[in-house]
Every structure is written in structure tokens, then in C-alpha cells.
Amino acid sequence: MQFIQLTESVGFPNRKSGDEFYNPKQENDKVTFQELILWPDGAVQYDTPEQRDEALQRFQEQVQGKIFILNKPNNGMLGLYIVHMINVSSEDEYYIKYVKSVANTAGILNSIPANIKGTGHGGYKFGSVSARKEAYAIKPSDIFTSEVPMSPDAVAGAIAAAQGIPEDLKAQMSNYLMALAKGNKNVIIQDGHKYKTVHENYTGEFAAPIAVITGQVTPEGSRLKAEQVLLGGERFANCKIVFPTSATEKLIDSKLVAPNGRTVGISSKAKSSGRLWCRDYALRTNTAVKRRKCRSYSRRNWRHIYISIQRLFSDYWPGNLCERAAGRSA
């Protein structure tokens, strides 16, 4: 076996024994890095796929522990990149990636991908304790598995019932969204600075449709104009919220479905200042409406209407409420 101890590279070659990797979906699920093993020993690749497969079979017979294969090989992948970990039960785990060769290991693998240990498993990422608190990915697609129309209260309730989220973070998100659903955009997220990045990147995606429904956008005239143009006179207050589950809906973070069947898509934008704005809403309707600042896309029967709903919440967006949380009460 060839054990790698490089320090001028990236990914697993730059890790040292004892480094911890964590599951972004379950904070108590961790593995500890032991070593990186590169095969063949003393060469950059095997001569044939058969030699590679025979070596892997011998490895599987010799080691004790669980083995996870990260990819499917082809005849040109003649090297084996093996990451040895120990899980919280002190069991050995080996993650094996077929590679073209082991001549240059930089950037081949930086983390263990999601779904390797089972469908829905978050994989493992390297990070300090403080970095873990910032790295939870809580997108709507992680919470909702179907496009069932919901009320603002139901969205907050779904967060409260979600699994794999630290309890304090879950409470922060659900309490904020529940207050927002009741019309209070000025609620302070207590200790929100601990998860500031999460609130900036993800809490806002849940908050945006709730804010539109509850009328918490400025100026008022823009909201009324949007109702007339996009909802055919129906009110946002009567809409239900749908979070798309399809990977093809990349431009749309949420949808508002009106009783008359009209659908408006909302795209939440993060600005370089760290605040989440919804200033440039991608308001999507299946009615072809011609307006200034109207940008057409190729999808049949759909048109994106950009209406200047300026600075949703302004200084009251979740990330800013985290910054101002110290010494304040909700």
C-alpha cells in the first residue's frame, strides 16, 4: 500500500489523520479520516482493467469494515483512490473511487458525496465546529418532497417538523416564519448570528412568498400593480405557496397559486452585501403580458415579468436581523 502525506495539495491528500468529516444533514453523524491509500503501489496505474479488479478484490478480502464504491469504472480508469475513515461506532469505512491514474491526486476528491451510504444520506464534508453551524443546507427541496399548496403557517410548521436540523436553528427559522406569517417582519432572530449564513441563503427562500402573501413588500403600489397584471385582479393574500421539486425549475424558488388558477413564480436574489433581496422578482405568469422591463424566454406560453418590487423587507431581511440580534428581544 502507498500512504500519502502530502501538504501542498488539496482534498484528501491535504488531510491528516484525525481530521473529522460531518454529515450536513445530521450533525451527530461523523467520520474521522485515517489515511489515503493509492493503488497500484509504486506505479501510477495498472496495466489492464483486469489487474485493477483483481487488486480491488484482494483488498476487499483483506480489510475488515464497510466498503463503498463511489463511481462506476471504465477501461481507462486504471487507478484506485481509497479513503479510509472510522465512524462514530469505531468501525472502519473505505470509500473507493476509480481514477485514470494516481499520478496527480490534487482535486480528485474533497469530500464524500451524498447518497453513497444510502438514498438521502448527506455524505461527509470537512469542517471545523464553527464552520458546521454555517454549512447546513436547508433549501425548500430538502424539506418538501411534493408540490402541495400550503398556507404560510403550514410552511413554518414544516420547518418545525423537519429532521436533520439542529434544534436551535430549527426553532429560529420556524419562529421567524411564524411571526412573519402573522404580519410581524420586525421580529428579531435570537442568537441568529450563529447561523447567519443559513438565514441569509435559505431562510429567505421560505420567507419570500410569505412576505408577498401577507403584504409586507414596498412600495404598496408595486404589489397592487402586480396583482392586477399577474393575478388578473386576484389578491396575493388569497394565494397558496408551492415550492418546486423539479430540478428544471432553476430560476424559481417558490410559486404563488391563486384561486383563479394563475401562478406567479418568485426568485429570491442574494446580493454581494450579504443581504437577501427580492428586488428583482422573477414574476412568472402563464398569461403573455407586454410591459416595460419584460424579458421573454424561449419556453412556450411562459413569460418572465420583472417588476420592481423594491427591497422586500429592506433592513428586515433574516440576515440583517441576525446581525442586530445581540441584546435584543423578539
Image (cartoon, grey):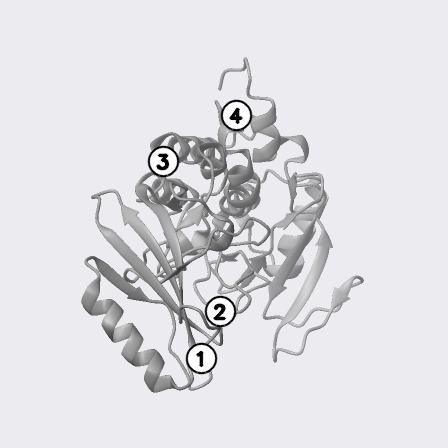
- Foreground: disc 1 or disc 4: 1
Which residue is drawn at the image coordinates 26% and 63% (left, top)?
Answer: 67
Residue tagged 2:
102
> Between tags 4 and 3, which lies in front?
3
- How far apart are the alpha carbons under marks 2 and 4? 54 Å
Mark 1 or mark 4: name the one nearer the start of the chain.
1
Nearer-the-camera pick, 235 or 281 = 281
| Alpha-carbon span between mark 2 and mark 3 | 39 Å
Q: Which numbered mark, 2 or 1, is in the foreground of this view?
A: 2
- Image depth: mark 3 or mark 1 in front: 1
Q: The N terminus lies in which quarter of the figure?
A: bottom left
- Residues packed near mark 3 inside 10 Å, few (<14), some (14 to 19) or many (20 plus): some
Q: CA distance from mark 1 to mark 4?
A: 55 Å
| Secondary structure at numbered mark 4 | loop
The residue that appears at 54% across and 33% down in the rendered structure is 196
Comes first in the chain, label 2 or label 4 = 2
Is there a contact, CB below 8 Å, between mark 1 and mark 4?
A: no
Q: Please tell me which residue lies in front, 235 or 252.
A: 252
Q: Which residue is mark 1?
A: 77
| Residue 18 numbered tag | none
| Residue 187 circle label | 4
Q: Give neighbour class at mark 1: few <14, some 14-19, many 20+ (Cα, 10 Å).
A: some
Q: Residues within 10 Å of mark 4 (few under 14, many from 20)?
A: some
Above-or-below relation of 119 to 308 = below
Amino acid type for the residue under numbered disc 1: Met
Of tags 2 and 3, the one toward the viewer is 2
Residue 55 in which image quadrant: bottom left
> Mark 3 = which residue?
166
| Amino acid type at image mark 3 | Pro
Q: Secondary structure at mark 3?
A: loop
